[in-house]
Image (cartoon, grey):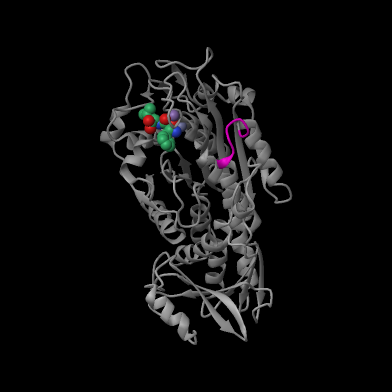
Amino acid sequence: MNVAFASAIPASTQIVAHIVTEGSLPEGLESTLVHGAKAARFKGKTGQVFDGFAERNGEVVRIALVGSGETGDEGRGANLEQAGAALAARYATSGADTIAIEAGTLSVDEVAAVLTGLRLRTWRYDRYRTTIKDDQKVTLANASVIGAGEGAQDAWTEASAVAEGIEFTRELVTEPANVIYPESFVQRCRERYQGTGLEITVLGVEEMTELGMGALLGVGQGSEQPSRLLAVKWNGGEQAGRPMAFVGKGVTFDTGGISIKPGPGMGDMKWDMGGAGAVAGAMLALARRKAKANVVGVMGLVENMPDGKAMRPGDVLTTMSGQTVEVLNTDAEGRLVLCDALTWVQKEHDPVAIIDLATLTGAMLISLGFEQGGMFSNDDTLADALFAAGRASGDKLWRMPLGAAYDKLIDSPIADMQNIGPREAGSITAAQFLQRFIDKGRPWAHCDIAGMVWAAKPGATWGKGATGYGVRLIDRYVRDVLEA
Ligand code: BES
Ligand code: MN
Ligand code: ZN
């Protein structure tokens, strides 16, 4: 999306859009539009669109009214993104290539939010489609904002960094597992991070063996694709200041292993790397907007396959922490990948706090569906800040409990713990497992985002498919907590 800021509507414009606060149409609107909007019961609810025409300066122009909800809403930014996205959904393939957006009374950050939604909703990944028809192609490519305040360009440059991160996450999540596997995930990041100042560290199988990462390696040992640990560092804060850590589950395909999953729907497990995808995209966003913070992103990258070499149910693995795990179900692999990544980041970087993101349990879909991720934390301050970042960014989270009674459920008769508990509270016992690898006193939050990475139907700023969930959440947390 090419974006320009102007004081008057360029002659080439095919659509003029007004952003409408719920219940109040913009002043000076033609009476045909006022009547039309009323007849269509257009109120200005978030994402609602009224499509009309008006004669302006002797020419008929297409006018869009798009709702952005109420101004006092806690998720105001997210609502404005949704308004921009609604415009994109309506006009992306309309044949029009240029839209003008009247800034009206919007602040420069609010304008940037509208543009973000517009850009994100026109995103598609058509790399493998060789026969798209012309009328399915995105035509909308230019937006000009009319009458935005001073600093609008800077606000947009900043917001574009985040949009770029989200798009990168979507790309990684959308790619099939024959294209994105541990090594190629690393390669794709290397290419995308060029010139950003991000520092990349990659551990291969030999190095991880040396470090004793028996759990992460146990998951990957049934695959032809060698496992990787990818760490990406952004040093935008005080020199030598301890970093904040984000850790992502990067299972590039999850067959379940020997505890194999049923066939129907298994293809979904190409996006079992959505946590790592979010971290990869967020690191790009932070670097692109030169965030004033020290952050390390760690991604545990493995493929979970059934094979003669694969780990078996009943196997006991020794983790990097020294703790042992009885693998009762090879499909509960995400926690095995994360536990070694968590130990590594604590030993290597001594982070001020850790937030991990993972498509960890199907049980999460049963608890919270596709609306919010589950959050588990050992620290109320961290949990509250993360919760607030979720509300403000639109990447919502809901806090779930941890506790000793749940922890007991993963004790093993042969090892320090087993990798599954009973069927009940499956998301919580998974979180308890991770907590056993967090150093005492270290603030940590785990986000189970199993329901958020992929959408079966179009949503706020995405079409069907990869949502890019997590990038805005991380970005918002970094802004409001680390950069504040
Ligand atoms: N990647 C899955 C969780 C998942 C399921 C994510 C559906 C998104 C949609 C995870 O590795 C898994 O298989 N978890 C098991 C754990 C069980 C064996 C304790 C699950 O949830 O069934
Ligand atoms: Mn699994
Ligand atoms: Zn998995």
Magenta stretch?
Answer: 174-180
Ligand 2, by image quadrant, is top left
Q: Is residue 245 above or below residue 112?
A: above
Magenta stretch encompasses residue 179: yes
Main secondary structure type of the part rendered in magenta: loop
Q: Is residue 224 above or below residue 139?
A: above
Which image quarter: residue 68?
Answer: bottom left
Residue 103 position within the rendered picture, expressed as x and y whole percent measured from the top left: 56, 77
Task: Judge by depth and name the residue closer to the eye, 155 or 293.
Answer: 155
> Residue 59 falls in which quadrant of the image?
bottom right
Q: Position of residue 98 (x, y in %)?
A: 64, 68
Query: Is residue 179 in view?
Result: yes
Residue at 70% x, 50% y is 197
Query: x and y percent of residue 399 in the render?
Result: 34, 49
Q: Residue at x 55, y 71 (%)?
A: 111
Q: Is residue 334 visible?
A: no
Q: Is residue 53 above or below residue 470?
A: below
Furthest-top residue in this view: 308
Up the image or down, 405 lies above or below 101; here it is above
Q: Quadrant of residue 423?
A: top left
Residue 387 or 262: which is nearer the viewer?
262
**In the image, 125: left or right of 460?**
right
Residue farthest toward the left in the current orientation of the protein: 405
Q: Horizontal and vertical percent for residue 357? A: 47, 43
Give left or right: position of 388 versus 118: left
Q: How many marks?
A: 0
182 part of magenta stretch: no
Q: Quadrant of the N terminus?
A: bottom right
Residue found at x 50% / y 18%:
306
